[in-house]
Image: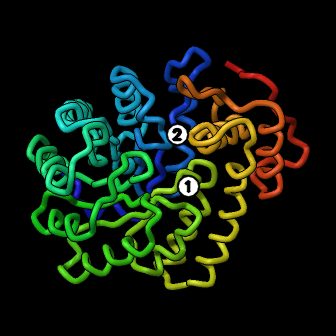
């Protein structure tokens, strides 16, 4: 088993490339994964929100993890999202992921029959009992409608139930309390921020790493930023973050849709236009970005130096 301290640094949540028929595009996945590993990322998180996990049927989730483990081939740790509506379904996902050879699991709170703190804590304990893999809690209240409380997370960390937390709550105050409380009891949890635009602040506060969706687009800058933080070069950390914040404009000016269609849709469109993905196909019922939205994304990529100024805009899928 990989020590939980291996899950630190830059851990991009991998965007799942799809063909026009909504099947997995393994060729594009391999290009993207190899590019991020070549950039120096520390681990990869498959089947997170950026991977459209909530949209993928069980069979496709299994295909993603099988391909991920094969492509990564032990070069970095593989984290797998086991995100489902209730505990027994999550345990099924955990057992499937473990059988496919991943290195760690990431689970949200349950999100259909909403319970209270007692049920959420039991949810994580039950998952832990069902697997031998390190388990990370994914704090994502905007999607699951439950905010994970720092005291519970730290207690589960001390008991060895949780090995870490991926925090995408947007609650900076709670995040800071989580870091402080975790340090006070010996740092049992690896704490990762999921907010790619404010990673500098998270590192300054003591975060153990980041899970930036934008790292699919520019993994090199996130690796550079982590290395600068490790060296204590905080002016460089901020300068790099400002550059990445400007790159995040690819998601901010989408007009056709909102939510996953604008965020993950922009990531997929950027990867498609950069020649890493063959399509920008989304999972149903979300539609791929087209027209002026694509043009705006390309303009940002060119402005930030991720596409040549003369590069033409792709107008249709290649595959």
Q: Residue at x 70, y 52 (%)?
A: 252
Compare marks 2 and 1 and give the one earlier in the sequence.
Answer: 2
Query: Distance of mark 2 from mark 1, alpha carbons?
Result: 16 Å
Horizontal arrangement in the rendering, residue 297 relative to residue 216 (left or right): right
Total residue callouts: 2
Specify few, some or many for label 1: CA neighbours under 10 Å numbering under 14, 14-19, or 20 or more: some
Secondary structure beneath dot 2 equals loop
Secondary structure beneath dot 1 equals helix
Q: Residue at x 27, y 54 (%)?
A: 136
* Direction top: furthest residue: 21
Pick the quarter of the image with the C terminus: top right
Quadrant of the rendered image containing residue 71: top left
* Horizontal and vertical percent position of residue 183: 26, 80
* Horizontal and vertical percent position of residue 234: 56, 84
- Which label belongs to residue 5? none
* Horizontal and vertical percent position of residue 125: 12, 51
Quadrant of the rendered image containing residue 266: top right
* Horizontal and vertical percent position of residue 40: 50, 58
Res 211 visible: yes
Horizontal arrangement in the rendering, residue 266 relative to residue 1 (left or right): right
Q: Residue at x 23, y 54 (%)?
A: 2
Determine whether 303 is above or below 46 in the image.
below
The reply to whether discs 2 and 1 touch (Cβ–Cβ < 8 Å) is no
Horizontal arrangement in the rendering, residue 123 relative to residue 248 (left or right): left
Determine whether 58 is above or below 155 in the image.
above
Closest to the observer, 259 or 292: 259
Q: Circle 1 sits on which residue? A: 39
Q: Circle 2 sits on which residue? A: 15
Q: Residue at x 62, y 18 (%)?
A: 20
* Direction right: furthest residue: 310
């Amino acid at each position: 088993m990989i020590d939980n301290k291996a899950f630190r640094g830059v851990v991009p949540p991998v965007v799942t490339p799809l063909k026009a028929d909504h099947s997995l595009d393994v060729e594009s996945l391999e290009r993207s994964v190899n590019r991020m590993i070549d950039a120096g990322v520390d681990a990869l998180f498959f089947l997170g929100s950026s991977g459209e996990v909530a949209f993928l049927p069980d069979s496709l989730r299994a295909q993603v993890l099988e391909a991920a483990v094969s492509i990564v081939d032990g070069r970095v740790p593989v984290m797998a999202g086991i995100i489902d509506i209730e505990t027994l379904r999550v345990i099924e996902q955990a057992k499937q992921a473990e059988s496919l050879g991943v290195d760690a699991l990431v689970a949200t709170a349950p999100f259909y029959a909403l319970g209270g703190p007692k049920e959420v804590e039991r949810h994580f304990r039950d998952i832990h009992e069902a697997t031998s893999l390190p388990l990370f809690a994914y704090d994502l209240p905007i999607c699951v409608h439950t905010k994970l409380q720092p005291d519970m997370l730290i207690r589960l960390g001390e008991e060895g139930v949780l090995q870490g937390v991926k925090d995408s709550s947007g609650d900076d105050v709670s995040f800071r309390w989580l870091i402080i409380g975790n340090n006070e009891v010996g740092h049992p949890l690896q704490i990762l921020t999921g907010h790619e635009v404010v990673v500098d602040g998270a590192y300054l506060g003591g975060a153990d790493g980041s899970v930036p969706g934008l790292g699919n687009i520019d993994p090199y800058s996130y690796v550079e930023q982590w290395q600068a933080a490790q060296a204590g070069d905080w002016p460089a950390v901020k300068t790099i973050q400002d550059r990445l914040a400007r790159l995040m404009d690819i998601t901010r000016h989408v007009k056709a849709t909102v939510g996953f269609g604008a965020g993950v849709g922009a990531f997929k469109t950027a990867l498609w236009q950069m020649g890493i993905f063959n399509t920008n196909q989304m999972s149903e019922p979300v539609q791929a970005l087209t027209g002026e939205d694509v043009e705006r994304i390309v303009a940002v990529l060119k402005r930030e130096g991720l596409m040549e100024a003369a590069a033409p805009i792709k107008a249709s899928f290649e595959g």
